[in-house]
Amino acid sequence: MAGSPFFFTRVVGLEPVEVGLGISLSAGISLLTSVPLGVLMDRHGTQRLWIGSAAVEALLFALYPFVPGLAGYLVVMVGLSVVNSTGRIAIQVYSLSALPPAERVRAQAFQRSALNVGFTLGGAAAGVAMAFDTVGAYRAMVWSTAAMLGLSAIFFARLPGLGATARRAAPGQERGSTFSVLRDPPVLSVSALTGILHANATILMLILPLWIASRTDAPKPVVATLFVLNTVLAVIFQVWVSRGADTASGAAQALRRSALSTALACLLFVVTIWTKDVMTILVLVAGTLVLTYGELTHAAGSWGVVSALSTPERRGEYVGAFHLGDRLQRMVAPIGFTALALETGGGWGWLVIAGAFVLAGSLVGPAVAWAERRMPAPPSPPPELSESVREKRER
């Protein structure tokens, strides 16, 4: 993530706008393929597609140095978009299928803490390549990435298989028509609202650095310091913040806290128009702390929503649908929120962004409750199973 733009501009010779075109195209492909990829997992098994996606992703990274200009770059980016989406959906579907409901959110919190450690190490490795700033260093960067992805595919293959049970409808329960989740207003509403709330990542990674550089008197290295602060807090506190988000109502509460925290962070950032020197840095740190809390609670709430509102026999399809809002946000928020924050006089655009989060946060609870009411009732266990459970309870 950190080194790819430099690779394609320094080694392949693309213009920054061409790199941006590839990123936007990737976001559009991810939006279109999320649900179909989930359906494929429901039909053919999650683990097989997960292993294949990691292997193909490794191959595509290995081909980076041989990309022949813009056309080749776009082909590689489209391919990476598909296999990366496959991997993201697969790890969530596998976790939901392999773990009991009470452990799912906590387990995914540990996964996200590990992911942030990985971001830190990967960013450091990219920093080494950028420090050397040679073709050889950038090639070593992408080939080492390809090797790590290939190793990941081997690890995925060694995980316990889930069999076909997660893909069969339970007795007395209908599978439903394929892609019917796209005609499910409650699920799509929750997906859209959680996607809007995930725009806090766009604020951290894109808008805040541009704001600091162009609208405040803070030194530019502060940006890197805030990124490190965010990552360290995510590693340490993600599991703790995720407690209580393993039910639909608990997840909705976490998402509301995320919305209010992000809105408060926006209000703090706009204050830096009028602060000076040390006070500016202190306000930026305070805003980053609040924004990070919003990020962590959003992650926990999103996992809880997917766990509570997806049916086992169509889990891949539902996970893909819940990813739609985030994919759409990735296409719209960078342009819209950047224009609001940076292209409006006096910083009032931050107030509009804060209002968007408050509105989404106020709607997400009713939307989750609506979707929960529409969930099919679990099938009744066979009489012999009920008797066995009763005997165990009596003992």
Image: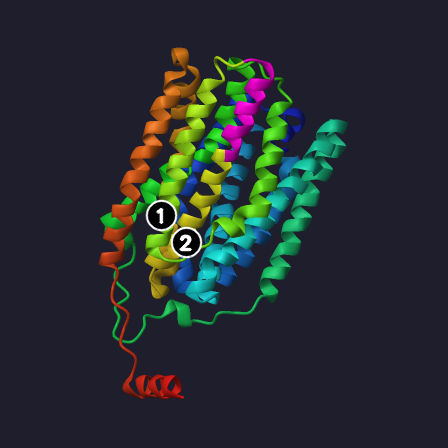
Distance (Cα) linking label 2 and label 1: 8 Å
Residue underneath mark 2:
245
The answer to whether 75 is drawn above or below residue 47 in the figure is above
The answer to whether 16 is drawn above or below residue 294 in the figure is above
Which SS class for mark 2?
Answer: loop
Q: Is residue 15 visible?
A: no
Q: Amino acid at mark 2?
A: Ala
Question: What residue appears at the point 58 percent right and 61 percent down from the top-left corner?
Answer: 156
Nearest to the observer: residue 225 or residue 261:
261
289 relative to 137 in the view: left or right: left
> Which portion, as a residue range, is magenta?
276-289
250 relative to 78 in the view: left or right: left
Residue underneath mark 1:
253
Q: Amino acid at mark 1?
A: Gln
Question: What residue appears at the point 43 percent right and 71 percent down from the top-left corner?
Answer: 164
Classified by dominant secondary structure, the portion drawn in magenta counts as helix
